[in-house]
Image: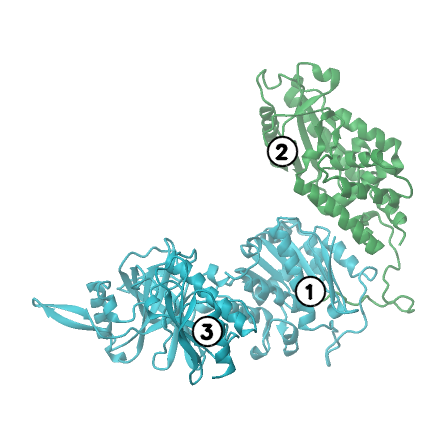
Amino acid sequence: MDKNKHLDSVISTHQITKEEILFDKYVKKKNEVKEALEEQYGSNIYTPFNSGSYAKNTAINTKFDFDLVTPFKRNAFGSNGTLKEMYEDVYDFLYEKYKDVAVVKKQKVSIGLEFYADSDGDVIKIDVVPGRELSQDQYKEDENLNLYVYYKYGNIDAGSERIKTNVKAQINNIKDRATTEKDSIRKIIRLLKVWKNSKYNYPTKSFFLELITIKSFDSKCITGSIWDKLETVLEYIRDNVTKEDFTLKDPGNSSNDLADTLTSTEKQQLSDDMKNMLDRIEDNDENLKTYFPENSKFKKEDTNNNQYGKNSGMPIPPPKLIFG
Amino acid sequence: MSQRVIEINTVVESIPDVKIVKPFVQSKIDIEGCVTVFVEGLEQPLEFNVTIHPQYPFKSHETETIKFSNDDLIEHKHIMQNGAICIHTAHTPVLSQKLIYDIESVKAWIKKYYINKESDNHYEHLIVPQKAFNENHFVYFFNEVDYTFHKNQFGFVDYSIMNNGVFHKESIQSSIFQSFLSKDRKKIIDVDWNFQLKNLPKSTGLFIFVKDAPSKNQRWVFDEWKDFEAILPQDFLKFLHNVQERLVKKEAKLLPLFVGYNISETEIHWQAIILEIGNFPIYGEKINKQWFTKISEVKSIDWAMTRNCSYRYFFGRGKLSDRITESKILIIGIGAIGSIVAKTLVRCGCRKLGFIEYDVKEPENVCRSEYSFFTGITNKTNDLLNELCLVSPFFEPVNGGYDYSEAFDFFIKSHLADTSIKAEMKKHLDNYDIIIDCSTDNDLLYVLSQLNINSTLLNLSISNHAKHLVCATEHNRYEFITSQFGGNILKFDVDDLHNPTGCWSPTFKASYNDINVLVQTAIKQINLKLEQEKTLRNFVIETDDMGGFNIKIKEF
């Protein structure tokens, strides 16, 4: 099996441009939510913006990350208003507005909106991330925001008053690297997102995978084919993520450590998953497809992928070989 | 004098602090003698009659074949009814070494239980003589009930005979408690068992809760009825009298009396006494013109056996993690893998189990599954239900059965496009904590993978010759299983299948042993992961017969 050919196909079948109609639905819905927030909060809010993977140029078409950052002014909830009050207020507003058409739920630092399937069966998910500037008018200067942690987030405790960060700096950092190193960093990030998506509810955030990919490229000399690069990144994660002194600096605030967004058990699980993945791919190249599946919707069908009954002149249906 | 007797005398004499009072001599079968043993802390050495059986230094039926007895020590801990110290020492085939070990053990007993009067942490049951009643033994199994008995509460117990068996060389009848009833036969509380046990025909016995153990020294149970004189209240004795009067037509029939007492603040133990109708150990006596019921002075008690079969005792020696045993589990497909999984789970402490299967059991299924030949052709669901009820008194079948299985297959496969039915199916399946799909039905695998079920969903399947077991635990189960068996990853013989005579569908070749070693390994892996609170990952168990049997778990 040609691993590079397969990985190229994984990337191409996951290109966002292949899901234009669905993508447009996301954009439309995101704009609707943005306008609703602007209307509700008027002059208390700066312009909400998308901080998801599309903004960072690392999106895949099986899971659009649409995170709508909502920057509030310092006194939006009164001069003594807390970040918790901000978070609860945004939740209450979104719940009342969308409760009949979507599941509205409180998440780690965001509020999740999962719209019920439309007539095509498509489900649109938008995460709204409320943030507040640190002092009056400061956001205009440096774009720093405080986020509220609703429930335990790795090693960061629930109810923690704030995570100070600069989301725009986060986006730009990743977007710049992903754009300038599109054959390496961008591709690897996309592949890791495909892998994460196959795991369903994996505790590691996409942002973590983006940063650790960049860090591994900065820490090691990563060259060669796409598989060579992917293998090196997987090895880097396997070998480093559980180290006590391992840190992942938030490009939006160097005093935030993204390594804290995972518990030690979750870090161990991530390392074990990398190890298992590398071992199984070494056992048999074909296992690569289990971890990095093509998007079957856009896959070019292999007309002769059934090894049973090959060259027999007459088509033979594959026998049942799974028993119990 | 034989060389063996000479050696015993020589060795015992050489052991420090041991003196031979009566030299060892050969009796008809055993070698017997008398020694004193001194331990610091004693005023005087203790004397023991020593009996050495012919098997010595080997044990017989897991019992030491040397006895150190002294009737005066009978009230001390770890002394058997014949006055012998209860000792267990290390194995050695060398007689002289074994004698040294055994006397060291006697010294340790003296220090611990005679001088220091230590108490053990675990409760030691009263010693009850195992005597047959009219050449029959009786044993009664009880379960803990959620009810607090008060001292001297008495009434009836409904019990059911489960089986007549053989106990060494005599017969034995095993029964279970079914419910406690008041003296006017109003139900106090039911005793929980599986539904088949609950449906057994019932007989009547009596109970009294005496609170304190019926023992003079906390070691042996009372041996004569007069020992109960100060304990059994007059109204209970009258109750006994009335019961006997009412059952006069059943004279000579047996009636068990269960005597309950606390062995800890929260735990009750029941002992059983066999009463013979018409021959109860009571008599009437008129005192001051009033009749009283009295206990017959010289009548020994016929104790039967009891066993606490509550969940924690029944599974006390080993079970799976609570995360599995406390779960409500659905097994889809109960062929070779599914039936082994079901029986293993039930034997390992699982209670709530349902299964889906529309197939019937044929004689040729028996050799590699958990079914029996005896029941002939019958639905697998019905047969497995019976098998599991035989294994565990705590098995509680949830949904299952033939009709349920048919309905399940129809609904889940016919309505995938109908979002509301799909949502209903999802909701129904989410009622289970764990779903184990052993059906190897790729269509069902696909359908289940489309449902986003919140329950832990596991798929188990094997390859021909049971060379591999594939266990999918993750969201990508459909892709994982189809790729593993797709021909490019797992390599196994695809031609050497079993083609049953007269049957159109070939099946895999593998024995019960081949399959079971894989299934048990898989259950071990799943249990370990859950016990360690780790996330389950897909895995493949690979076996290899080259150079001996090799088995390896490959986690994905």
Badge 2 marks a residue whose secondary structure is: helix
Question: What residue did someone put label 1 on?
Answer: B518
Q: Mark 1 is on which residue type? A: Leu
Residue B263, given in percent of the width and then of the height, sits at 37, 58
Specify the quadrant of the image occupied by residue B206: bottom left
Write down which chain is painted cyan.
B
Relative to the observer, which residue lies in front, B357 or A158? A158
**Chain A as rendered: colour:** green
* Mark 3 or mark 1: whose residue is earlier in sequence: 3
Residue B222, given in percent of the width and then of the height, sits at 30, 68
Relative to the observer, which residue lies in front, A296 or B95? B95
Check if mark 1's residue and mark 2's residue have beta carbons within 8 Å: no
Check if mark 3's residue and mark 2's residue have beta carbons within 8 Å: no
Residue B389 as seen in the image, left or right of residue A136:
left
Q: Mark 3 is on which residue type? A: Ile
Q: Residue at x 50, y 71 (%)?
A: B99
| Residue reaching furthest to the bottom | B28
Q: Which residue is drawn at 79% across and 53% down?
A: A280
Question: What residue did someone put label 3 on?
Answer: B66
- Crowding at mark 1 (Cα within 10 Å: few <14, some 14-19, many 20+): many
In this rendering, the answer to whether A155 lies above or below B472 is above
Q: CA–CA distance between discs 3 and 2?
A: 83 Å
In this rendering, the answer to whether B128 lies above or below A166 is below
Q: CA–CA distance between discs 3 and 1?
A: 45 Å
